[in-house]
Image (cartoon, coloured by chain):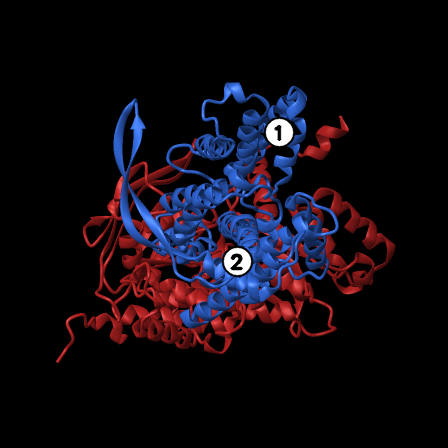
Amino acid sequence: MTSPDHDPRRDGAGPEPATVSITDCSLSFGDLEVLANVSLAVEPGEFVGVVGPNGAGKTTLLRLVSGALEPDDGTITIDGTDVHDLSSRASSRLVSVVPQDTTLSFSFPVRDVVEMGRHPHRSRFSSPSPGDRAAVERALERTRTADLADRPIDEISGGQRQRVVLARAISQETPVMLLDEPTASLDVNHQVETLELVRELVDEGRTVIAAIHDLDLAARYCDRLAMLADGSVVRDGPPAEVLTGDALADSFDANAVVTPNPVTRTETVTAFAGEREAEPLPDRVHVLGAGSAAAGVLARLEAADVAVSLGPVSSGDSAAETARSLGVDTVETEPFARPTAAEIETISSLVQEADATVLADFTVGSGNRALLDSLDETDSLVLVETRPFAERNFAGGEARERYERYRERGIEVPGSRVLEAVSTVGANRSRSRSSAAPDSRESTDD
Amino acid sequence: MYRPARTAVWSVGLFALLLAVALVSATFGPVRIDPATVAMAMLNAVVVPAGVTVGTVPVLGIPVPVPGLEYAAVFSFDVPETRQIIVADIRLPRIALAATVGFALAAAGTVMQGFFRNPLADPSIIGVSSGAAAGAVAAIAFPALIPFGSLHLSAFVGALATAFLVYAIATDGGRTPVATLLLAGVAVQAFLGAMISYMLVHSGDSLREAVVWMMGHLNNSQWSDVRFALPVALVGVFVLCAFRRELNVLLLGEEDANHLGVEVERTKLLLLAIASVVTAAGVAVAGVIGFVGLVVPHVMRLIVGPDHRILLPTSALAGASFLVATDTLARAGPAVVPVGIITAALGAPFFLFLLTRREVHSL
């Protein structure tokens, strides 16, 4: 009883699945090599997330697959057909694209913009068929833009516009969808909603390649991740294998820890600002200080796999709590109590053993003035200050003078750059140790 | 979603408006004629093909048979002969030509604004009018140098040659970036402006004729002008209408349009070529009539929306009515002036009014 022109794809079951193969593709813009020998095979019904730092070539890769750019070398095929051999019409029936920049400066109603997705399926003089109308309404429903359908496209928010453009791509009913940062301007609720929808489209048999900035979301929704860096696929596999601290360090120049998300049980990336330095990180760092300044320093050092110790710190301080949760070796003192002689002894030896010592909002009281003696002996000081010293000095003018001298000898940095600073002072110290130089103060007295 | 019925209703309504404007226009002139007589005289002028004749045209001295159509009048109302002549042979050709030119310019303007995604685009943005003016001024000032003899043909050829030149300059490796096209158009127009000025300086006694032509006028309109311009405009606008959906999709940008199945470069070439031919046909018979192609599409966009499926046919029909109405003012107003003066004098303040009301902020 099926009519001759009955098309099962119009029933919402999704189009036939298709394979995308990118083989040895290279592309240069002038002298700038954007992609170098990129290969990626995407199976039918697979959701591949392309991740990587800005400028890694994610958008360029998607534009190669969409046919907007032609590779200098290599081929891109969809179900065995080279995309560059296809007419626009033929390729627009195979691949739909959700571009990153969705700015539209004319006032078409949202529904008409979604209807443009039906263009490849219509002949020149036909009015929209019932099938076209149904596909448009379905796409509006699925992207939850049906209530916007009669609003002009230039009067809705950027996030709404992004969903409308996704609806347009859905109404195109193609086996392959390319999404360039589909969640970039969405709020957290719509990010998840949109990716749930994309996941649904994939489960219906569509093949989706998406550039995704948010690594956590990429890990949560993609079957596979391809990590691009400097125009090459550096890793390709399940999210758990691709998102590792080392991989992120290599590709993103980031200090990041990857931990399982307690709720979704997928990989969660926590990155810290600051680049990995050319200088090797020191092995041991001691931190004197308190409060959020010290806590931030501890977290950054710990994330960079540096052995950290902290003290003295009052047991109720937020830095002490952070140290406990990170498992940092800590010398805790009772609140408002002076450190004991034994504790000062321990701290002095920690300072001596450390490659670098960080003063993070270090508070000088009459009780820990003795600590300053041990600081006089180290020349690898880093100062991280968020509050003026006057507020932290309870030991008078002499303490202030000594602290000023630490300032001159050490490096003063904002908390975000502490890794760089400890690397620098740590490297100086190991150099001076290995050359067994005489005491520099004597030589300058000559 | 787009409803074809809405376009049909608007088009039929605007066509009825055009007929009404034409009827009213034909009553005005040195001799006032009442509307009933005008209507009857107009109906008397309606002819239908009634038979085929074979005439001969001498080609290189040899008579070549050419088939022609024989026409027969449909109506024969009783109208005084002088009135019939005034309406059918003097006023109607001018009204028909005004409608044709307005139709062509407004349609081409709509297409150019959509094509360039630029609200300031008008039919002559790639130099069509300048080319036509150069051709016409050359024909007027140096008739001996122009082989075509005909002013209209010279303007038409100048217009198309300029459009082709601009397109060729802006095309590199099979791609024609819209911005390059725009700038090439500006540069070529500036160059042609210099050429035209040079020719005007040396035009001697024909200066006045050349200047009046460039202002755009419909004086001395003949049915032969209509027979040349109307088929070009009708066929051209019909072809443009066939690409209305592509025009919509092109508004998304060329890369997106390509992803939605539009062969971008081919469609651009076709739209540009047809819009230029349609503009050239209008400009060749009427001179450079400004603002019709700029303002009418904007006004219609405010009324019917930006969708080219309804915007293009309604703009074309509204342009026809607009030019018939303004030309009536030009020929039967307090002073007889070239219609180009009226369209700009009315169009520019109206456009400024829209701008300051912030009505025109996008396509």
- The location of residue B61, given as percent across then percent down, is 29, 22
Of pointers 2 and 1, the one earlier in the residue sequence = 1
Name the tint of chain A in the rendering.
red
- Residue density around tag 2, few if under 14, some if 14–19, many if 20 or more, within 10 Å: many
> In the drawing, does residue A127 fall left or right of residue B84?
left
How far apart are the alpha carbons under marks 2 and 1?
29 Å
Relative vertical location of residue B301 with respect to residue A423 in this rendering, above or below: below
Judge by depth and name the residue closer to the eye, B17 or B351. Answer: B17
Report whether mark 2 lies on the same chain as mark 1: yes
Q: How many marks?
A: 2
SS under mark 1: helix
Q: On the image, which quarter does residue A6 sit in?
A: bottom left
**Which residue is denoted by mark 2 in the rendering?**
B315
Which residue is found at the position 62% from the left and 64% from the top?
A: B34
Residue extending furthest left? A1
Q: On the image, which quarter does residue A368 sit in?
A: bottom right
Which chain's colour is blue?
B
Specify the quadrant that holds the C terminus of chain B.
Answer: bottom right
Q: Which residue type carries mark 2?
A: Ser
- The location of residue B172, given as percent across then percent down, is 42, 32
Which label was assigned to residue B69? Answer: none
Which label was assigned to residue B193? Answer: 1
> In the drawing, does residue B212 fall left or right of residue B124?
right
- The location of residue A307, given as percent across then percent down, is 51, 56
**Could one spot residue B344 in this view of the protein?**
yes
Residue extending furthest right? A397
Which residue is found at the position 58% from the left and 28% from the top?
A: B137
- Residue density around tag 1, few if under 14, some if 14–19, many if 20 or more, within 10 Å: some
